[in-house]
C-alpha cells in the first residue's frame, strides 16, 4: 500500500516468489505524471501494468494506492475485489490518522493481518492451470504424476518448464496418420498437436512453434472436438 501524496510504502507483504523493491516501485508509480491524473478521475478503478514476468495490479482510492504483483495465471477480477476491500477497510481504520500522519509506517503494522487474511496469504486469486494433453499420452502422464505423489511431492507449474527440456520417452508416441489422410488435420496441425503432452500450455506451444496463440487455440479446439485431447489441471 502506497501513500499517493508522498510515495511512501505504508505496508508491504510478500507471499510468493515474485521479488521487487517496494520503495523503488512506490517511487516509480507515483512519479508517473499521467498516473495520478488518470486515477484522480475515478475511485476504485483497476489498472494493470505488464512487467513481462508478472503483472502489477493497481487500485487507487482516496489518496491510497493498493498494488499487488500477480502471476499472469491469477484471476484479476478476484484480485481487484480483494484490493478494493483492503483499501475500504484501511480508510475506515486509518482515514483520520492519515490526515495528520507524520511518516511513521509502524502505525499501520496491525493492519498486516487483515491483508494476509483477505489475500489468503497470496493465494486468493490462484486458478488451476489447464494443460492440453493428447489421450495417447494421458495414461503415462498420470502414472508419472502418481509416482511423484508417492514421494510426497506435487507436480507444479514450475516443474513443467524443467521437463520440457528433457521429455519422457513416451512423448515420442504419435497419432495415427489417418487423421491426415482422412482430412481431420493437415500436416502442420498434426505436427503441432504432439506438443500437447501435458507439459506445454497453449502459450508455451505457440512460443515454441512460432505461431500466434489464437492459431494454436483453434488446433487445440479441433483436437478436442475429435476426441483426441483432454485437459489436466496444475495448481
Image (spheres, rainbow, N blue to C red):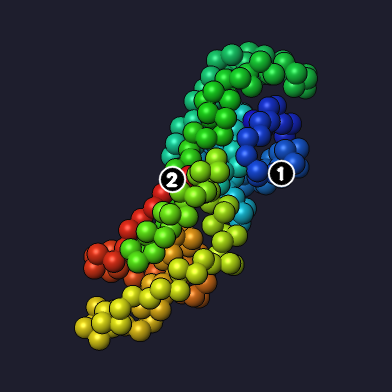
At horizontal 61% and vertical 54% (from top left) the residue drawn is: 53
Could you tell me which residue is drawn at 52 percent across and 25 percent down?
Answer: 118
Side of 27 relative to 92 (left or right)? right
Q: Which of marks 2 and 1 is nearer the N terminus?
A: 1
User: Viewer-nearest of labels 2 and 1?
Assistant: 2
The local secondary structure at tag 1 comes to: loop
The residue located at (65%, 44%) in the rendering is 18
Residue 64 visible in this rendered orientation of the protein: yes
- Count of numbered circles on the image: 2
- Residue 140, located in which quarter of the rendered image? bottom left
Q: Which residue lies furthest to the bottom in this view?
A: 181
Picture disc at residue 20: 1
Q: Position of residue 68 (x, y in %)?
A: 59, 38
Give the residue number, with chain letter if any, for mark 2: 128
Q: Nearer the viewer, residue 59 or 162?
A: 162
Quadrant position of the N terminus in the picture: top right
For the point 58% across and 52% down, which residue is it?
158
Picture coordinates of residue 124, whole percent (x, y) = 49, 33
Q: Where is residue 62 in the image (x, y as percent from the top left)?
A: 57, 27
Look at the picture and state if 195 lies above or below 89.
below
Q: In which quarter of the image is residue 40?
A: top right
On the image, the x and y values in percent for residue 162 come to: 60, 60
Residue 27: in sight, yes or no?
A: no
Report helix, strand or loop for mark 2: loop
Q: Foreground residue, 126 or 103?
A: 126
Amino acid at each position: 500500500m502506497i501513500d499517493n501524496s508522498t510515495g511512501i510504502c505504508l505496508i508491504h507483504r510478500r507471499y510468493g516468489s515474485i521479488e521487487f523493491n517496494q520503495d523503488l516501485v512506490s517511487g516509480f508509480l507515483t512519479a508517473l505524471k499521467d498516473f495520478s491524473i488518470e486515477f484522480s478521475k475515478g475511485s476504485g478503478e483497476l489498472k494493470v501494468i505488464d512487467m513481462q514476468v508478472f503483472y502489477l495490479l493497481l487500485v487507487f482510492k482516496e489518496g491510497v494506492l493498493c498494488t499487488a504483483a500477480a502471476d499472469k495465471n491469477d484471476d484479476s477480477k478476484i484480485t481487484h475485489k480483494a484490493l478494493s476491500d483492503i483499501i475500504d477497510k484501511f480508510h475506515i481504520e486509518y482515514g483520520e490518522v492519515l490526515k495528520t500522519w507524520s511518516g511513521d509506517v509502524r502505525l499501520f503494522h496491525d493492519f498486516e493481518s487483515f491483508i494476509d487474511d483477505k489475500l489468503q496469504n497470496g493465494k486468493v486469486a490462484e486458478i488451476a492451470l489447464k494443460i492440453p494433453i493428447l489421450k495417447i499420452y494421458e495414461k503415462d502422464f498420470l502414472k508419472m504424476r502418481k509416482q511423484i505423489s508417492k514421494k510426497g511431492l506435487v507436480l507444479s507449474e514450475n516443474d513443467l518448464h524443467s521437463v520440457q527440456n528433457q521429455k519422457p520417452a513416451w512423448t515420442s508416441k504419435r497419432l495415427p496418420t489417418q487423421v491426415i489422410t482422412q482430412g481431420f488435420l493437415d500436416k502442420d496441425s498434426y505436427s503441432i498437436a504432439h506438443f500437447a503432452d501435458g507439459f506445454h500450455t497453449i502459450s508455451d506451444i505457440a512460443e515454441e512453434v512460432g505461431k500466434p496463440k489464437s492459431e494454436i487455440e483453434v488446433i487445440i479446439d479441433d483436437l478436442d472436438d475429435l476426441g483426441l485431447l483432454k485437459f489436466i489441471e496444475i495448481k
